[in-house]
Amino acid sequence: MRLNTPVSAIRLDAQGGLAVLAPAGTLHAEHVILAVPPAMDRIDFGDMLSSDLVRLARATPVWMGADPDVLHVQNWSAEQWTSPSTVQHLADYSLLGHILYQRPALDGRLHWASTETAVDHAGHIEGALAAGKRAAHAVLATPGALNSRSVTTPTTSR
Ligand SMILES: Cc1cc2nc3c(=O)[nH]c(=O)nc-3n(C[C@H](O)[C@H](O)[C@H](O)COP(=O)(O)OP(=O)(O)OC[C@H]3O[C@@H](n4cnc5c(N)ncnc54)[C@H](O)[C@@H]3O)c2cc1C
C-alpha cells in the first residue's frame, strides 16, 4: 500500500501488462483494480479505452453530486481525490453498475471496483465492498494470477 501516491496515468506496457504512473515512479502490474469513481478525470488512459467506455465513465454520477445548500464541515464534492471535476453535472443514475464495468478492460487487466460500478447498493459502502470483491475474483480467476511478475516496482522516478 502506498499513501500520498496519486496515480496520474495507466498504460499498456511492453511486457503485456499495465504500467501505473505516479509521481514517485512507475509500477508494473498484470492487473490493476481501479477503485475510484469512473468519471475521475485525473487518471490519463491515453486513447486505450473504447469510446463507449470513455463516454460511460465520463457520464457516470458519483453519489455526492448533489448541490448542497449549506456546508457544515466539508464539501466532499470539491475533494480532489474523491470527486471528479464534473461531479455536479453527473445525474444519470441508470449508469451506476453498468454492464461495461462488470467486465475488465485493457485486455482483461483493468478492473473497475468503485461503488459506482456495483450492480447493487451503488453509492454506498455495500456497493464498494461488492465491487471490490467482484474485481478481486476476476483477477484471481485469471490464469497465472498472482505469479511473481504480478507487481514490480522499478526505482526510476518521473
Ligand atoms: C461524508 C460521507 C458520508 C457517507 N456516509 C455513508 C453512509 O452513511 N453509508 C454508506 O453506505 N455510504 C456512505 N458514504 C459513501 C461511502 O463513503 C462511499 O460509497 C464509499 O467510500 C465508496 O468507496 P470506494 O472505494 O468506491 O471509493 P472511495 O472511498 O472514494 O475511495 C477511492 C480512493 O481512491 C483514491 N484516489 C482517487 N484518485 C486516485 C489516484 N489518481 N491515485 C491514487 N488514489 C486515488 C482516493 O483518495 C480514495 O482514497 C459516505 C460518504 C461521505 C463522503
Image: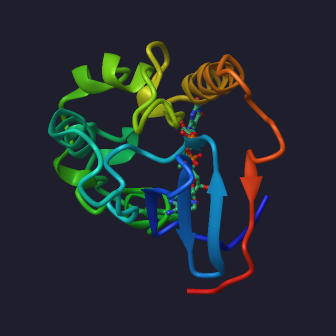
* Nearest to the observer: residue 38 or residue 124: 38
Towards the viewer: 35 or 77: 35
Q: Please identify the quarter of the rendering in which residue 23 is found.
A: bottom right
Vertical order, 129 against 44 (above or below): above
Q: Quadrant of the C terminus?
A: bottom right
Residue at 31 percent across and 48 percent down: it is 39
Front residue of 145 and 58:
145
Q: Quadrant of residue 19?
A: bottom right
For the residue pair 25 and 86, the one nearer the viewer reads as 25
Q: What percent of the width, then of the height, locates residue 100?
A: 32, 23
Looking at the picture, does residue 126 appear above or below residue 43?
above
Please report the residue visible at 23 percent of the width from the left and 57 percent of the height from the top: 86
**Lateral position of residue 144 relative to residue 112, left or right:** right
At 31% from the left and 53% from the top, the residue drawn is: 68
Outermost residue, right side: 148
Q: Name the residue rendered at 47%, 22% in the picture.
A: 118
Residue 147 drawn at (x, y percent): 81, 37
Residue 10 relative to residue 6: left or right = left
